[in-house]
Amino acid sequence: MIKKSDQVRIKPEWQDEGDESFLWIALDDEDGGRVTICPIGTGLAYPPRQVVQTSMLVEHE
């Protein structure tokens, strides 16, 4: 189960170009098989947020 503040990676088959270069963090606890994620370290004032299915992610080691 993914919890708020967990670091995650997007599985390669679900990545957009460049996603692998970001460190992604869960913004909330997993709920109903979904979680909100956000890349950190982008330098953007308002980093993008995405709601994704947890099956699209792996927890970062």
Image (cartoon, rainbow, N blue to C red):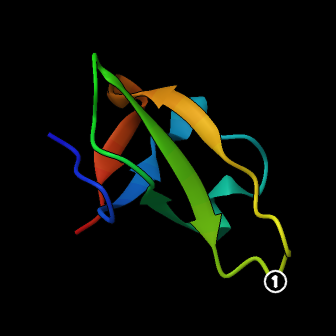
Residue in view at x 43 percent, y 54 percent = 9
Relative image position of residue 29 (x, y in whole percent): 28, 43
Relative image position of residue 4 (x, y in whole percent): 30, 56
The amino acid beneath tag 1 is Gly
Q: Is residue 20 left or right of residue 42?
A: left
**45 up-or-down from 5: above or below:** below
Q: Residue furthest left?
A: 1
Q: Residue furthest top?
A: 32
Number of marks drawn: 1
Residue in view at x 29 percent, y 62 percent = 6
Q: Kindly identify which residue carries mark 1.
A: 43
Q: Nearer the viewer, residue 29 or 61?
A: 29
Q: Is residue 28 left or right of residue 3?
A: right
Q: Mark 1 Cα within 10 Å, few/some/many (few <14, many 20+)?
A: few
Quadrant in which the N terminus appears: top left
Q: Is residue 33 left or right of residue 52?
A: left
Relative image position of residue 43 (x, y in whole percent): 81, 83
Residue in view at x 56 percent, y 31 percent = 51
Q: Is residue 31 left or right of residue 11?
A: left
Q: Nearer the viewer, residue 2 or 11?
A: 2
Q: Secondary structure at mark 1?
A: loop
**3 up-or-down from 21: above or below:** above
Q: Nearer the viewer, residue 53 or 12?
A: 53
Residue in view at x 66 percent, y 82 percent = 41
Quadrant in which the C terminus appears: bottom left
